[in-house]
Every structure is written in structure tokens, then in C-alpha cells.
Amino acid sequence: MVVRNSIDWIALILVIVGGLNWGLVGLLNFDLVAAIFGMGNLLARIVYILVGISAVYMIYSVTKDMT
């Protein structure tokens, strides 16, 4: 994937944050996002939603580059 603009950078950073968070959950049973923003907090939910949207955008971006 080639990072072309600021949206690509933001999406890449959020996907990396999400991946690291899931790695911590799997390895240590520690949710970093919940630790920072609070469990069930609206801000934590927004971060989770943005990470999910970023993952969908990255899938779109990678498949678009393949064609």
C-alpha cells in the first residue's frame, strides 16, 4: 500500500493502533483503549468505530491499488 494523502496516514495509524490493542488483549488481557478512555466510555467507542472504519478503508485502498 502506498500512502498518498493525510486520510491514508490517519487510516494507517488507526489500523496499527487497533492491531496493537488486539495484540495486547490477546497476549495480556489488557485493553489499552479502555485503559486510556475508560471502559464503556463514549470516547472509547468512537475510537473503536474509527479503527473499524479505517480497516474497511484500508481494504478498499489495497484492493483499489491491485486493479
Image: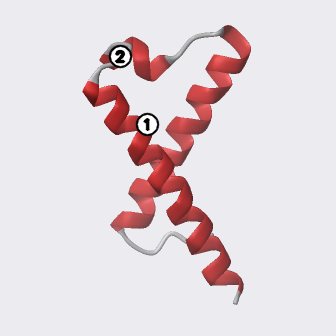
The answer to whether 23 appears left or right of 32 in the picture is right
Q: Secondary structure at mark 2?
A: helix
The residue shown at (55%, 54%) is 55
How many other residues sit within 10 Å of disc 2, few (<14), some (14-19) or many (≥20)?
A: few
Residue 40, image x, y percentages: 36, 18
- Identify the image quadrant of residue 61: bottom right
Q: Which numbered dot is residue 48?
A: 1
Q: Which numbered dot is residue 4?
A: none
The residue shown at (62%, 28%) is 22
The residue shown at (47%, 55%) is 54
The residue shown at (54%, 37%) is 18
Residue at mark 2: 36
- Identify the image quadrant of residue 62: bottom right
Instruction: Find out whether the residues at labels 1 and 2 contact each other: C-beta distance under 8 Å.
Output: no
Q: Secondary structure at mark 1?
A: helix
Look at the picture and state if 58 lies above or below 5: above
